[in-house]
Image (cartoon, rainbow, N blue to C red):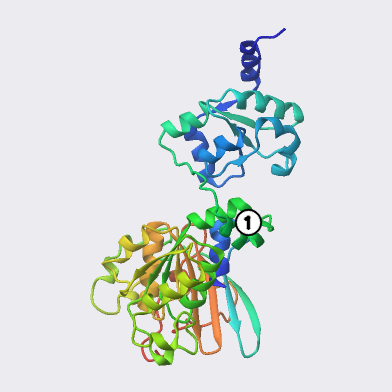
Amino acid sequence: MKTLKEMLAEARRVVPEEGPADLERRLKSGDKVVVIDVRDPDEYRDGHIEAATNISRGFLEFRIGTAVSDPATPIVLYCQTGLRSVLAAKALRELGYATVINLQGGYQKWVQSGLPVVREVPMTPDQIQRYSRHFLLSQVGDKGQRRLLRSKVLLIGAGGLGSPSALYLAAVGVGTLGLMDGDVVDLTNLQRQVLHTTADVGKPKVESGARTIKALNPDTNVIPLPMRITVDNVMDVIKDYDLVVDGSDNFETRYLVNDACYLAGKTNVHGSIFQFEGMATVFAPNEGPCYRCLYPTPPPPGLVPS
Amino acid sequence: MQATETVKLLLGIGEPLVGRLLTYDALGMRFREVKLRRDPKCPLCGTSPTIKDLTIHMAGGGACALGADSPGEAMAAAGAPAARPGG
C-alpha cells in the first residue's frame, strides 16, 4: 500500500507548481486560464481568490467538464495549503487536461503574499428574490451578481444620459454608484432626465438622483458628489471607482474625463446625444482608441449649439 | 446602451464597444457601427504622447483644444459622425 507521502511525491513529480505571484501575473495578462478552488464550499465562502470557481475535490472529475470546455485551457488548482489540490491536479491530468498547475502553498500562501481575496456575504432572502432572474442567466449567475454588488461605478452627469444609466445600474444591483453633478433640477430637464421629479425642481440633481436610486434599489449605495468635475478633483474622484460612465454635456468635460481615465487606467463608457441622434463607445486604456483618437480637436465654438 | 456596456464590462462578458462607435438615429430608427482605430499620433495614447498629466487642462479656457491638429485618424469608415455637444 502507498503512503500518503508517496502519493503526494508522485503527484508532485507530474504536476507543475506556480506561486501566488505567477498566478497573479496570469490573471492580469488576460490570457485564458481557469482557476478552481477545490476546497469545500464553506471554506470557499470564508474567502477565496476572486477569479476562482468552487468545485470541491469530491466533485472535481464530475464537474470539470462544465467549467472547462477546452482541455487545452490552462487550469490552476488550489486548496488551503496545496496538498489536496496537487492530488486533484494529478487526477485532471489523467483525464486528459493538458496544462494543470498547482498553486504552490495554496490559499494560505496567496493570503500571506498580501494578494486580494473576496469573502462571500450571504445574500438576504430579498436579494435572492430580487436578482433571481440574473441567476437564470449563465453569464451572470450568483457569482456575477456578487461581482456587481461589489462594483463601484462613477456617473459623470445626472442628466439626460446619466439618468437612464443610473436607473439601470441601480436596478441590476451595482453596489456603489457615485453620482457627480453640480446642477440643480430645472423644469426644462424633466422631459428627459428621468431621475428627477416635478417636486425636485430647484434641488441639487445628486439629491433627487440619490433618492430615486435608493427607492429603486436599497442595495445600491449612492455617493452624491454635488460638484462639477474639474482638473483639481478628477483624479481624486475617479481613483475610488472601477469604471466611469461619461454622461457629460460639454467637450471640455469629455476631454478631461478622457485624459484622466486614460492616465488612471480606468475604462470610460462614453455616450453623447444631440436632438434625435446619439452615439456610444467604450474607451478602454491600451485596448482601444481614446476620445482624442476620435476627435483630436473639439469643434470650434459657435459651430455646435450648447 | 451605456448601462448595458457597463454591466458587460463589470462582469467581463460579451463583446464591449471597444474600438467601435455605435450611432443611433432616432428619426430614421437606424443604428450604424463605425470601426475605430487607435491613432499612433494621438497626443494621449499614441506612440510618443505629449500629454502625460492634466496640466493641459489647467490654463484657463480652451484646454480641451490642445492636442494633435491632424484630422481624426481613428475613423476607419468614411462619413463618421461629428462630435455631439449634448449630454
In this rendered view, identify the residue nearer to me: A144 or A120: A120
Chain of the residue where label 1 is placed in the rendered structure: A
Q: Which residue is mark 1?
A: A140
Query: Does A298 sit left or right of B23 as displayed?
Result: left
Quadrant into which the N terminus of chain A falls? top right
Q: Is residue A112 above or below residue A234?
A: above
Asked where in the image residue A247 lies, by quadrant, the reply is: bottom left
What count of labels does the image hold? 1
In this rendered view, identify the residue nearer to me: B12 or A186: A186
Place of residue A169 in the rendered image (x, y in percent of width and height, measured from the top left)? 52, 67
Q: Is residue B81 above or below residue A77?
A: below
Q: Residue at x 55, y 60 (%)?
A: B9
Place of residue B19 in the rendered image (x, y in percent of width and height, measured from the top left)? 56, 65
Asked where in the image residue B30 lies, by quadrant, the reply is: bottom right
Evaluate whether residue A296 shows in this view.
no
Task: Residue type at mark 1: give it.
Answer: Val
Q: Residues within 10 Å of mark 1 (few under 14, many from 20)?
A: many
Q: Residue at x 55, y 89 (%)?
A: A276
Quadrant into which the C terminus of chain A falls? bottom left
Q: Secondary structure at mark 1?
A: loop
Query: Does B82 sit left or right of A237 as displayed?
Result: right
